[in-house]
Image: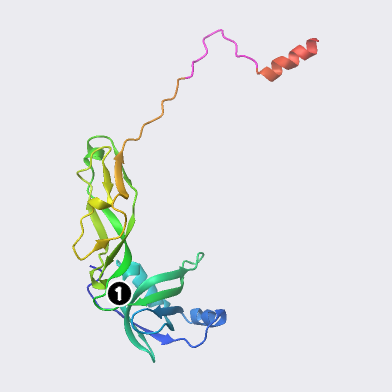
Amino acid sequence: MAQDKDITVRAEQRTDAGKNSSRRLRARGFVPLTIYGGEGEAVSAAAPLRELAALLRSDTGRNTIFTLDVDGVGASEVMFTDRQIDPIKGRLMHADLKRLVRGQKIEVTVSIHLDGEPIGVTEQEGVLQHVLHEIQISCRPREIPEALHVDVSHMNVHDVLHVSDIKVDETIEILAEPDTVVATVGIVREEEVEPVAEPTEGDEPAEPEVIAKGKKDDEE
């Protein structure tokens, strides 16, 4: 499941908005946040970059569930819904967090891991092509899997694995279309290259057309 320990991040409420305010927060090592959903109103806050970055680098990544305790507002169980990353520095610039309601299902995106090596690869000189790497599911927050694992060891050449072939616990609902292709085993065909005839001894190479034309013009 998503995680096996409770995590709490302390944050401060934001009263100032705008680029200058956000710039001052980032200079202090904080990230501007917006918390919404659940039973409360939207709240603007800021939390330490170091702690948020550690959550995103963890095994559960963006699907990490944690408690955000905002001074003057209170604590809420939240998870990431969106984030803005500096394209140059790779640093978290802003994040949107959603309050979670106990027992209420949410929609999240998880990775698809292919387990095993297909027969079509080991015995039939095929190539495994992983087409769909992530998939959207619906489940309760505490039941979010780190990834969906699919066994592909039985696949032969020309076999196709669809979303409908993924087996999940009854607590998880897959939202992607059943006929969406997840993986295939195909054969890479090498293009045949026609051999170039080698010149035999005594043959003179033909002159380029432009040179031959030049000689004819000189004779005239």
* Residue lying furthest right: 220
Who is closer to the viewer here, 68 or 214?
68
Q: Which quarter of the image is occupied by the C terminus?
A: top right
Look at the picture and state if 167 lies above or below 45.
above
Task: Please name the residue that numbered disc 1 is placed on.
Answer: 65
- Residue density around tag 1, few if under 14, some if 14–19, many if 20 or more, within 10 Å: many
Q: Which quarter of the image is occupied by the N terminus?
A: bottom left
- As shown in the figure, which amino acid type bears the numbered disc 1? Ile
Local secondary structure at mark 1: loop
Q: Is residue 25 left or right of residue 205?
A: left
Place residue 188 in its image quadrant: top left
Residue extent of the magenta highlight? 196-207
Residue at image point 32% right, 35% down: 187
Can residue 210 be seen from the camera position used here?
yes
Give x and y (percent) for residue 115.
23, 51
Who is closer to the viewer here, 101 or 216?
101
Residue at image point 42% right, 82% down: 42
* Residue lying furthest bottom: 72
Residue 204 within the segment the image draws in magenta: yes
Residue at image point 52% right, 80% down: 22
Who is closer to the viewer here, 80 or 172?
172
Give x and y (percent) for residue 38.
34, 80
Residue 201 within the segment the image draws in magenta: yes
Q: Main secondary structure of the magenta part?
A: loop
